[in-house]
Amino acid sequence: MKIECMKIERFEDIDAWQLGRELTRKVYGLTKKAELARDFGLKRQIQDAAGSSMHNIAEGFGSETNPEKKGNPER
């Protein structure tokens, strides 16, 4: 069985990032409700946690994690 690797050009194309975006939108909608809207600290913490996955994927996408490139400054 041959597995083909497709090159991802943008982090927005990664399925996990798209799911994280969907989750973040839902969390932001839920935190607008009265129960959490008054507790600004908790509201902000929950929103930050929801967006964290998207930020981490984007940050990792931009880093030099390719083992072929790492340690070889000529590439």
Image (cartoon, rainbow, N blue to C red):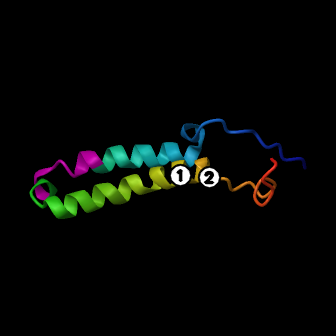
Residue that carries the numbered disc 2 in the rendered image: 63
Q: Residues within 10 Å of mark 1 (few under 14, many from 20)?
A: few
Magenta stretch: dominant SS?
Answer: helix
**Secondary element at tag 1:** helix
Q: Gap between marks 1 and 2, in whole Å?
A: 7 Å
x%, y% of residue 11? Answer: 57, 41
Which quarter of the picture shows residue 67?
bottom right
x%, y% of residue 5? Answer: 79, 43
| Residue range corresponding to the magenta coloring | 28-35
**Secondary element at tag 2:** loop
Marks 1,2: beta carbons within 8 A: yes
**Residue closer to the observer: 29 or 75:** 75
Residue that carries the numbered disc 1 in the rendered image: 59
What is the three-letter code of the residue carrying label 1?
Glu
Query: Does residue 31 show up magenta in the picture?
Result: yes
x%, y% of residue 57? Answer: 54, 52
Q: Is residue 37 left or right of residue 75?
A: left
Residue at 75% x, 39% y: name it. Answer: 6
